[in-house]
Image (tube, rainbow, N blue to C red):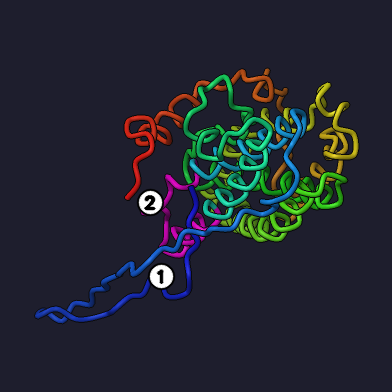
Amino acid sequence: MSATRTADDVHGDIHRDVHGDIHGDVHVDAVELDPELVGAGGADADHDVAQYAQWLGDDALVLAQRLGAWISRAPELEEDIALGNIALDLVGQARSLLHHAGTADGRSEDDLAYFRDETEFRSSWLVEQPNGDFAATIARQLVASTYMHELYARLQHASEPTLAAIAAKAVLEVAYHRDHAVQWTLRLGDGTDESRRRMVAGLDAVWPYVDELFADTPLIDRLGDRAVRPSTLREPVLAALRDVLRQAGLAEPDLPPAPCGGRAGRHSEYLGYILAEMQVLARQHPGASW
């Protein structure tokens, strides 16, 4: 599922044509598959830990698929690279989490990513929301990365060793993801009238899906200190978001929560399309390799 870029993966050559115009050729030499899974080789997950790992793994996987759609379409080359790298980090997190989930019943991370139907996914509605324009993607990314950073900062101290190990690595990655979203929120919110208008529209589009991230369930009660209770994340996450919005001169949207149900397998109208695109090759050619 994932690939790790090395420093020598991509290089560019600049040359001039017969008219003197400058052109750049980009060559991809190699993309090495990352053989490591954080926490692999540890104890198998029980049913409850597997369900929780699927929550987190599905969030990371679906958000990565959304961000991957920006590659070659971002407003500038640096954003193509930045959003692509964020997506790759999320794929790596999804691999580790789904691998751990799969140890409960003998399924691989690929089985869980490519051969589950829509109702078997446990992603939140926030990560399923459309990319919209660039400001809408940044609004979604600001909320998602702020939530993930607070979540993994706590989960790295959980009593379940594999989840703790995955979180300890992920928290470093999502700190960068959050900083990227914060910097763009400040630029767009405090930029032109048009950038501010689009940033406000993006925040309005994703804010109804924030509440679902903090919903406790009986699964969380059973997990105890092996997981992070979602409701305990509400205040620190909202405080962090409000601080960014204040710096950007933006108001917190005053919108009611949407009736979400992603943790129970009830999804937005968008997930089916995301999975169709993500799973089509694996399902049409199961077991294929190249």
Q: Is residue 10 above or below residue 209?
A: below
Tag 2: Cα neighbours inside 10 Å, few (<14), some, or many (≥20)? few
Viewer-proximal residue, 141 or 104?
A: 104
Residue range corresponding to the magenta coloring? 66-86
- Rendering quarter of residue 219: top right
Q: Is residue 109 above or below residue 12?
A: above
Helix, strand or loop for disc 2: loop
Q: Is residue 209 magenta?
A: no
Q: In the rendered structure, are the residues bearing label 1 and label 2 in contact, judged by CB atoms less than 8 Å apart?
A: no
Task: Measure how far apart labels 1 and 2 are at the Cα level.
Answer: 20 Å
Judge from the rendering whether residue 198 lies leftward or rightward of residue 75; answer left or right. right
Amino acid on which the number 1 mark rests in the picture: Asp
Which tag is nearer the camera, tag 1 or tag 2? 1
Task: Report the residue marked by disc 1.
Answer: 9
Question: Which residue sits at x=90%, y=34%?
Answer: 224
Question: Which residue sits at x=58%, y=46%?
Answer: 95
Return the x and y of residue 285 as percentages of the image width and height.
32, 34
Judge from the rendering whether residue 101 lies leftward or rightward of residue 6; answer left or right. right
Q: Tally the numbered discs.
A: 2
Question: Which residue sits at x=30%, y=69%?
Answer: 27
Mark linked to residue 73: 2
Tell me which label, 1 or 2, sits earlier in the chain. Answer: 1
Mark linked to residue 190: none
